[in-house]
Amino acid sequence: MKRKRIILPTDFSKNAWNAIVYALTVFKDDPCDFFILNSFQVGASGLSTKMARYNDTRLYNLMKEQSERDLKRELEKISALDKNPNHNFIARSEQATLVNAIGKTVYKEEIDYVIMGTKGVSGLKEVFMGSNTFQIIKEIDFCPIIAVPEDYQTDGELDSLMLATGYEHLFENYELQPLLHLPVNFKAKLRIVYVGNPADLNEAQKKSKEALEKRLDSIEHEFVEVEKDGSVTNTIQKMVQQDDTIDMLVMIHQDHSFFEKLTREPVIKKVAFATRVPFMVVHLFE
């Protein structure tokens, strides 16, 4: 089995720790290299005087040391929790924005997933979330992101995953790989949910649905069509809330997806803010 390579960004908060615990549990049966990544920024003073440069360097050294100390502590907590001989942990401290630190590591280390915590919706938190998780979903479009709600507890099993799609794309195997790995591993059921009237599907969408059906023949799956209830986001949220066997929501991110064209509604952004279960976003390589 090929080793999975996973980034776990951390700011040492409870929220980030919860996402780390989630990742270790969900990938317990996979040989994995986990990159525990902390990013920090030194406020550039904008003055290029000798004194300012000296202060920046001094500040950089202090912040770097602090970051490395905290990472060392985090690794100690992880090794107390995770005794899996197939799990390997690498601490990384980067001076960069979080998006840049993740992007650089994804490229350099050929990462399979980024798994991070999200905060729920409320005025201030949404600003934080908007600047972090959603920013990463938007910018890191070359690696699947799994966002874990801050108080989500996993029992270590995945019963079913829900893929919400508008069938706007003929999926390639490699695009589906990060999504299909989980139901295969957990023998979980995959539900493919279309919000809207199936009679409205055009030829391209029907072809995409048929192709998807063929690709899924080795996985337990079902296709579900639901009427729109208010908004697409609201419909998806309701389904997740009403069915507690759904352990993960998956959406495919592409510019101007079917849902967004149909509804002028930034579905992924809204779902990312409000989902109660972990949310995986897989990007399309267009």
Image (cartoon, rainbow, N blue to C red):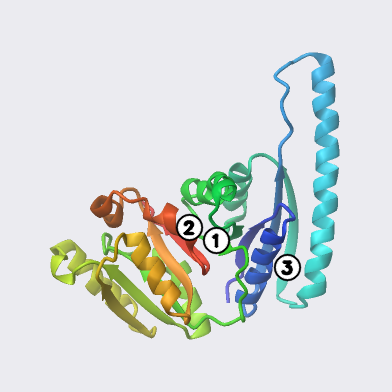
Give the Cα distance between marks 2 and 3: 29 Å
Q: Which mark is residue 38?
A: none
Q: Splitting the image into 4 quarters, where does residue 189 fall?
A: bottom left
Q: Is residue 41 left or right of residue 143?
A: right
Q: Earlier in the sequence, mark 1 or mark 3?
A: 3
Query: Do residues under tags 2 and 1 come within 8 Å of each other at their CB atoms?
Result: yes
Q: Earlier in the sequence, mark 2 or mark 3?
A: 3
Query: Do residues under tags 2 and 3 come within 8 Å of each other at their CB atoms?
Result: no
Query: Do residues under tags 1 and 3 come within 8 Å of each other at their CB atoms?
Result: no
- How would you rate the neighbour count of disc 1 (Cα within 10 Å): few for under 14, some for 14-19, many for 20 or more? many
Which residue, given by chain and number where applicable, does mark 3 sit on?
A: 88
The residue lying toward the viewer, choosing from 58 and 149, is 149
Q: Splitting the image into 4 quarters, where does residue 219 fall?
A: bottom left
Give the Cα distance between marks 2 and 1: 8 Å
Give the Cα distance between marks 1 and 3: 22 Å
Which residue, given by chain and number where applicable, does mark 2 sit on?
A: 272
Q: Which mark is residue 147?
A: 1
Q: Is residue 172 visible?
A: no
- How would you rate the neighbour count of disc 2 (Cα within 10 Å): few for under 14, some for 14-19, many for 20 or more? many
Question: How far across and how far down the image is residue 192, in percent?
Answer: 33, 74
Q: Residue at x 18, y 71 (%)?
A: 198
User: In the image, is residue 59 above or below residue 47?
Assistant: below
Say what amino acid the circle numbered 1 marks: Ala
User: In the image, is residue 153 above or below residue 229?
Assistant: below
Question: How far across and how far down the image is residue 257, in percent?
Answer: 30, 53
The residue lying toward the viewer, choosing from 172 and 169, is 169
Q: Residue at x 82, y 73 (%)?
A: 80
Say what amino acid the circle numbered 2 marks: Ala
